[in-house]
Image: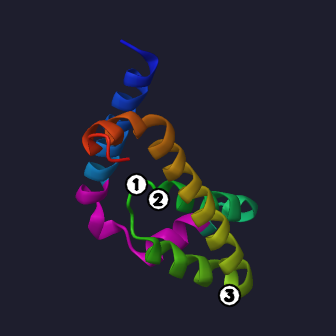
Amino acid sequence: MKRRTIARLLLVVLLVAAAAWVLMNRERLDTTMVEAWVQDFGFWAPALFVGLYALATPLFLPGSIFSLAGGMLFGPVWGTLYNLIGATIGATIAFAIARYLASDWVAGKAGGRL
């Protein structure tokens, strides 16, 4: 198999596993839980928060939870900055996945209309 095919299959498996985990644990995914968990990391909390936000974006997790938590954790100024950084990195990851791993599949589905 080609390396791109293996990468695509791995991505699909990871997305399905992440979606299944979110569905199984959706009652535990609330703002207070995220807030308490992130604050336990002290100095590293902003980096962890940005990383979680960036991963949540391509995994289709609700950004509103992270946006609210960012404001509550870090205040309006720093929370906004960390939210923007996390969302931008997440959008970049989603774009890279779409551009480099899923482009051939989408082009095939479009039937030459792209």
| Labels 1 & 2 near each other (Cβ < 8 A) | yes
**Left or right of 39, for residue 44:** right
Position of 27 compared to 46: left or right? left
Quadrant of the rendered structure where residue 49 is? bottom right
Where disc 3 sits, the SS reads helix
**Label 3 neighbour load within 10 Å: few <14, some 14-19, many 20+:** few
How far is disc 3 from disc 2 in space, using C-alphas? 21 Å
Tag 2's secondary structure? helix
Where 44 falls versus 39 (above or below)? Answer: above
The three-letter code of the residue at mark 2 reads Ala
Disc 1 marks which amino acid?
Leu
Residue 104 is one of the magenta-drawn residues: no
Which numbered tag is attached to residue 59? 1
Residue at the far front in the pictured view: 113
Return the residue at label 2.
56
| Residue 4: % across, % down | 44, 24
Q: Name the residue under label 3.
A: 76
Tell which residue pokes out farthest to the top in this image.
1
Magenta residues (range): 22-38
Kindly identify the residue that appears in the image at 51 percent across and 54 percent down: 55
Say whether residue 36 is magenta: yes
Task: Pick whichever, 102 or 44, lies toward us.
Answer: 102
